[in-house]
Image: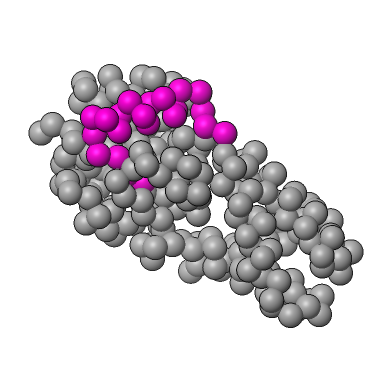
Amino acid sequence: MTIKCIAFDLDNTLWAVNPVIIKAEQGFYQWLKSNYPKITQKYSGEALVQHRMDYMHSKPELHHNLTDLRKNWMKILADEAGYDHSYVEPGFDVFWSARNEVTFYDGALEMLEKLSKKYSLGVITNGNADVNKIGVGHYFDFSLSSEKAGVSKPHQDIFHQAMEMSDHDLHQTVYVGDDPERDIIGAQKVGMKAIWYNPTLMPWPGGQTPAAVFQHHHQLEDKILNL
């Protein structure tokens, strides 16, 4: 069956996420320092990040919803410092705006522009980046986050929900991602073909092998054509 739809992971597939998050956390900390200094008097930047990570680890039931996780954590910070919760929405916006200031991998934007003229493109992501806020939403026909789906990859429901948003079937769709378990094995378990973005040529860790592997984004179209 000819591939008609390509669905993408976002973080670490189209851009490196760690530098984005670090910058967003730093901007959020500076905003707190200027507007809610009792929090930054108690926590250094590093300590605040660790506090958030500890909170996240304690709430596995919310891992599909990073937005609610962060907002709930911010309420705890407010309670500790004696602030009300009115700061949560503007504070989250400070972080989230910076979280969407991404730098695409070399060739990724060119790849999306080229593929969007030949295929239906979509997004299936566990993160809370927004392709419309980033400015590339016009390349995609659908976008589904774990927050909207209510489950995270590799849960089968998120892939099935994404296909309900698409005009194509699972066997007409290829999924592209960097994570062997969440992206590749997860997609293949529901009947999609899956292509692994593996820029450092790591060995495959085990489980059902991907349909193809690519190291550079300009290679992806040929990988799809050869499926």
Which residue is located at x 35 percent, y 39 percent?
139
Is-magenta flag for residue 168? Answer: no
Residue 112 % position (x, y)? 37, 31
Residue 129 % position (x, y)? 50, 50
**Left or right of residue 104: residue 211:** left
Which residue is located at x 69 percent, y 44 percent?
23
Which residue is located at x 49 percent, y 63 percent?
65
Is-magenta flag for residue 119? Answer: yes
Q: Where the N terminus falls, by quadrant?
A: top left
Residue 8 % position (x, y)? 36, 40
Residue 192 % position (x, y)? 22, 42
The foreground one among 101 and 152 is 101
Q: Is residue 122 visible?
A: yes
Colour option used: one colour
**Left or right of residue 140: residue 16:** right
Task: Name above or below for residue 12 compared with residue 69.
Answer: above
Task: Name above or below for residue 78 compared with residue 110.
Answer: below
Task: Return the residue found at the far left.
Answer: 1
Q: Which residues are magenta?
A: 103-123
